[in-house]
Image (tube, rainbow, N blue to C red):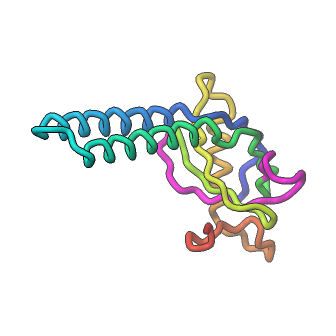
């Protein structure tokens, strides 16, 4: 099997991830509202649950705001991420593929694994070549080059 040709893909904050966070926040607020309405008097438990919920919402939104952005590059044999030191090869593992967006984990020898939410941009530029490269890179090559092989799921931590 031939490897996919090279591709560069600009990674921005994911709209899908933001939508998911907003939906979870709305569901949690609605649940808290129903819980509070069921109470005869609001007590410390309701305040504690509300405070924890508020903290979780802020943490989720800050996490999205600080999500990695940069360029993911496939040269036909290896992956490179602009957030890692220059010319450092990394291994990419496909975590979830939902056609319009994919979640991948990338890891290099010098940096911790990070998760990227990649999504199709409105113009669709480079989306299909990127997905072909992701799938192609998940298939172990017959060569002795270990960098092109996917990371087993247990090695991401």
Residue 57, by quadrant, is top left
Magenta stretch: residue 135 in it? no
The answer to which image quadrant residue 22 occupies is top left
Task: Identify the residue at image location x=80%, y=77%.
Answer: 144
Please provide the residue range marked out in magenta.
80-99
Q: Position of residue 52 (x, y in %)?
A: 39, 46
Decide if residue 110 is on the left or right side of residue 12: right
Q: In the orientation shown, which residue stands out farthest toward the bottom?
A: 144
Residue at image coords 43%, 37%: 20
The quadrant the C terminus occupies is bottom right
Question: Could you say which is closer to the camera, residue 134 or residue 59?
Answer: 59
* Near-viewer residue (90 or 47): 47
Residue 99: give x, y in percent of width and height. Answer: 49, 41
Note whether 28 is above or below 157 in the view shown: above
Residue 3 in percent (x, y) is at 73, 56
Quadrant for the N terminus, please: bottom right
Query: 3 and 10: which one is in front?
Result: 10
Name the image quarter holding residue 26: top left
Image position of 115 (left or right of 9): left
Along the line of sight, the residue nearer the viewer: 130 or 102: 102
In the rendering, at what x and y percent does residue 45 appear? 26, 48
Farthest residue toward the top? 123
For the image, the number of numbered tags is 0
């Amino acid at each position: 099997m031939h490897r996919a040709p090279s591709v560069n893909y600009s990674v921005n904050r994911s709209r899908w991830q933001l939508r998911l966070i907003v939906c979870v926040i709305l569901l949690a607020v609605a649940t808290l509202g129903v819980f509070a309405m069921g109470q005869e008097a609001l007590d410390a438990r309701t305040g504690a649950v509300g405070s924890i919920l508020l903290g979780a919402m802020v943490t989720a939104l800050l996490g999205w705001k600080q999500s990695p952005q940069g360029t993911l590059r496939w040269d036909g044999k290896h992956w490179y991420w602009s957030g890692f030191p220059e010319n450092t090869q990394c291994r990419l593992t496909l975590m979830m593929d939902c056609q319009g967006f994919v979640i991948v984990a990338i890891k290099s020898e010098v940096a911790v694994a990070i998760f990227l939410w990649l999504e199709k941009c409105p113009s669709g530029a480079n989306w299909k070549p990127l997905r072909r490269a992701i799938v192609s890179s998940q298939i172990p090559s017959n060569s002795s080059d270990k960098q092109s092989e996917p990371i087993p799921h247990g090695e991401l931590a």
